[in-house]
Amino acid sequence: MEGEHYASGSWLVAAGNEDQFLARWRAFLEWTRDSVPGFRTARLIQDTDNPRHYISLAHWDSAEQRAAWKASPGFREKMGACRALCDDMSGSDYTEAVHIA
């Protein structure tokens, strides 16, 4: 597939776990940066109306490298450590449809 490739998550962090979640998410994506080829960048943004709600977006060179990340040793453990601090989490993979700069 052509275009840009992303993985995204919508995280609802359990009350009182926000600082620990931020630390775990940072460690997870720093591990990703240092361990998995094809990773470009990641962002975690916080909802201004609900500060326990975060959206993550990771940018990948290809859909295949993104899939390799999800199958890599350590992914399940590190993702699970973040999810354990949440009341709810959903994730999806995306390919860019339109870009406005």
Image (cartoon, rainbow, N blue to C red):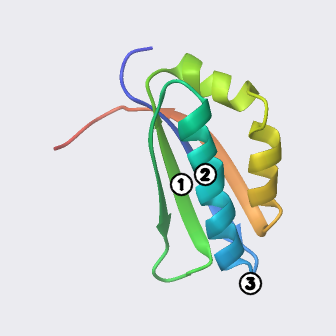
Left or right of 100? Residue 37 is right
Q: Secondary structure at mark 1?
A: strand
Residue 53: image quadrant is bottom right
| Residue 95 drawn at (x, y percent) | 45, 30
| Residue 24 drawn at (x, y percent) | 69, 61
Q: Secondary structure at mark 3?
A: loop
Which amino acid type is shown beneath numbered disc 1?
A: Ser
Q: Residue at x 48, y 20 (%)?
A: 62
**Mark 1 neighbour class, 10 Å CA radius: few under 14, some 14 to 19, many 20 or more:** some
Residue 16: image quadrant is bottom right
Which amino acid type is shown beneath numbered disc 2?
A: Gly
**Location of the N terminus (image quadrant):** top left
- Nearest the eye: 27 or 84: 27
Q: Earlier in the sequence, mark 1 or mark 2?
A: 2
Q: Compute the Cα span from label 3 to label 2.
A: 18 Å
Query: Does the CB distance between marks 1 and 2 fall below 8 Å?
Result: yes
Q: Residue at x 76, y 48 (%)?
A: 78
Left or right of 6? Residue 88 is right
- Nearest the eye: 100 or 46: 46
Q: Name the residue that disc number 3 marks.
A: 15
Q: Earlier in the sequence, mark 3 or mark 2?
A: 2
Q: Which mark is residue 56?
A: 1
Which amino acid type is shown beneath numbered disc 3?
A: Ala
Q: Name the residue that disc number 2 marks.
A: 9
Residue 89: image quadrant is bottom right
Q: Compute the Cα span from label 1 to label 2.
A: 5 Å
Q: Relative to residue 78, is residue 53 depicted above or below? A: below
Q: Secondary structure at mark 2?
A: strand
**Location of the C terminus (image quadrant):** top left
| Residue 97 drawn at (x, y percent) | 35, 32
Q: Residue at x 74, y 84 (%)?
A: 15
**Mark 3 neighbour class, 10 Å CA radius: few under 14, some 14 to 19, many 20 or more:** few
